[in-house]
Image (spheres, rainbow, N blue to C red):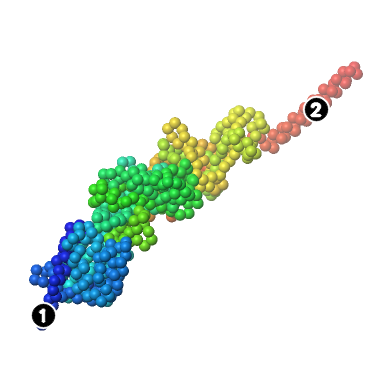
Amino acid sequence: MTKNFKLVLALALSIMMVLGSVAMADTNPVVNTHTIKITNTDQKVNHTYEGYKVFSGNLNADQTTLSDVQWGNGVDSAALIAELMTENAKTDSVLKGKFDGITAASTAADVAKKLSGWTSTKGENEEASLVDAFAAIVQKHIVAANKIDFTRNDKTYTASADSDGYYFIQDVTADADLDGTDGTDSLSKYLLRITDDIDIVAKDTGSQSNKVIVEGGSDVNDNNKNIGDTITYKSTLNPIPNPTKFDKVFKLTMEDTMEKSLTFTGISSITLGSKTLDFGTDYYFIYDGVTYDSALTEETATAKKAFTAPTDPVGAQGDNTANHTLRVILKGARALILNNNAVGQTLTVNYTAVLNADAELAPESNDNTVKFQFSNDANYDYDGDSDDWKPNEPQGKTPEKTVETYTTALEIKKVDGSNSNAPLAGATFTITAADVFNVVRETGDTFVAYTDADSANAAQYTYWKLKDGSYTTTDPATVTDPDTQYDGTTKYKKVHYDDTIVSPDASSSNKVYTVTSDENGIIRLEGIKAGNYTITEVAAPDGYNKIDGSATAKFAWDHVHAANVWTKPASGTGVATGGYTLTSEHTGNYGDFEAGTGADIAVAKITIQNFSGAQLPSTGGIGTTIFYVAGSIMVLAAAILLITKRRMGAND
């Protein structure tokens, strides 16, 4: 309720309650009926209004004064008087001393006369608070059986009052209609109105939330990222609600829910209209149950003066079994909004998160959802000891807005082309991208060089690297000419990665993963974004021929998708519903990449065949053996002949 409206209401009460004498009853009284109309052009949801007659009487000719005041059937008069007497006696009540002389035997005219006296000596703000306090007590003692229902026609609500009187009107829009599904309005302040026909304009905030990802200078609703990449979010509330109808306390908060695959890394800035808010002075926030507020006098396990982003936002996430919650709370929101002329402007919160090791692969998305909450019942006395919400405090909620980050994978399957495509372990590939990789979840084998730092596990290093890029367990000391076959004397151990977070090897212009197919013939990199990924076989399994050339998978994202609806690209087009395209290029004996199916529908997959080396026939056969035997006989005969001749010569 605006100040002007409160003033008009107070003046109406003053004029209405001038009761110098009681009007004489007419032997043929005229019963006046009136129309009460409420117009709510700002509404985002359908409202429900109810009316209750507090006083009945006769409206004078100029329609300003109610005479012959009696109790209306819309209130329990005895209970109402009893509470007025209680409030009158309280030292901390707004109504202290305002109903002196009222007893259980007091009439409706007695109570009305007390009300009429408020406007003659008091200022507007006090008048408004008195009327509000009286209305709140009336609300407690209405008689539900005698309510007057309003009929809705779009954004106009009408009801019929059966006589002159003083009516209490309340907005009882169900909480179910204020859950943010279609929008949220504020509940109207209790109204006390004298009839003739009345036309009330209800004002709602109509506040809406919005959330976007800031990507390359543009605002988008979804994007694609690598595991380890930072995502920048911007959440807004517009328009900022007007808190003037809340006499003391108005609360305003933001609640952001990040899926477990997102790690919050900090708030960049918050602006309220044109004012940049100060952390600790104007706001604080709560992340996963821990309060961060630089104005704190001391730190505890659940309260810290400052927030520090995790040193390992990708992996150091605890058990990550639940979503993460960020709540931003404005301090003294009523004064903050009014002092900075921010009513009707925009509240903007900028913050960041990192896509972590729990990232879900497309077609699933990694979601971030925001909503704003604000005081929406001006008849409720909000707890002023806390800027955050207390249990059961009524609040308006904006519709939730969700943005989505996608990531996908690349999979290589190595098979024996001459043996029913049986899986082949031990094929080594490089997977290269120009500055695209950050970290990924890797499945496959890799070889790690020995260092003195791991001397305790020296026995695990059982491999040597060959010049062709493959590895062997044959000790070069047992080979005749190791220098022509072995790439040095460093020993290696084989490590199997199974969805393990690993970093690429960085070169001057590209980032490279060197991975060996595991026992299932699989190499898989998960958590990659759009880009061009080139794979090259650098070493074949023992006994197989390495294929020449390379294959490149080309991912592109267009930020247009139907949520959780992904289809395999149509043959020859590479285009899939879901916001990505997949094409490929290759040289040598590589085939094309194809999109997977089912849960892997957004994954680029390629099957690569190896064939065993040629088994060349050996020279020779049985004839050679015969020659060997015959030759031996001839050599033996020659030797015998020579020895015989020498003996004969000696005898001579």
Quadrant containing the N terminus in the rendered view? bottom left
What residue is drawn where x is 42% and y is 50%?
291
- Going by the numbered disc 1, the residue's amino acid type is Asp
- Going by the numbered disc 2, the residue's amino acid type is Ala
Q: In the figure, is residue 535 to the left or right of 343? A: right
Where disc 2 sits, the SS reads: helix
**Residue most extreme to the bottom:** 27
Query: Residue 548 at what x, y percent from top left?
Result: 48, 36
Q: Are marks 1 and 2 in contact (CB under 8 Å)?
A: no
Q: Please tell me which residue lies in front, 431 or 314.
A: 314
**Label 1 belongs to which residue?**
26
Q: What is the count of numbered marks?
A: 2
- Regarding residue 199, the answer to whether it shows in the image is no
Q: How crowded is mark 2: few (under 14 residues within 10 Å), some or many (20 or more)?
A: few
Distance CA(mark 1)–CA(mark 2): 164 Å
Q: How crowded is mark 1: few (under 14 residues within 10 Å), some or many (20 or more)?
A: few
Quadrant containing the C terminus in the rendered view? top right
> Which of the two discs, 1 and 2, labels the residue nearer the N terminus?
1
Q: Is residue 231 above or below residue 289?
A: above
Q: Which of marks 1 and 2 is in front?
A: 1
Q: Please tell me which residue lies in front, 606 or 351.
A: 351
Where disc 1 sits, the SS reads: loop
Query: Residue 74 at what x, y percent from top left?
Result: 24, 74
Q: Is residue 478 above or below residue 521?
A: above
Picture quadrant where residue 306 is located: top left
Query: Residue 309 at what x, y percent from top left?
Result: 43, 43
**Label 2 belongs to which residue?**
637
Tag on residue 454? none
Picture quadrant where residue 281 is located: top left
What residue is drawn where x is 63% and y is 36%?
455
What residue is drawn where x is 88% and y is 20%?
648
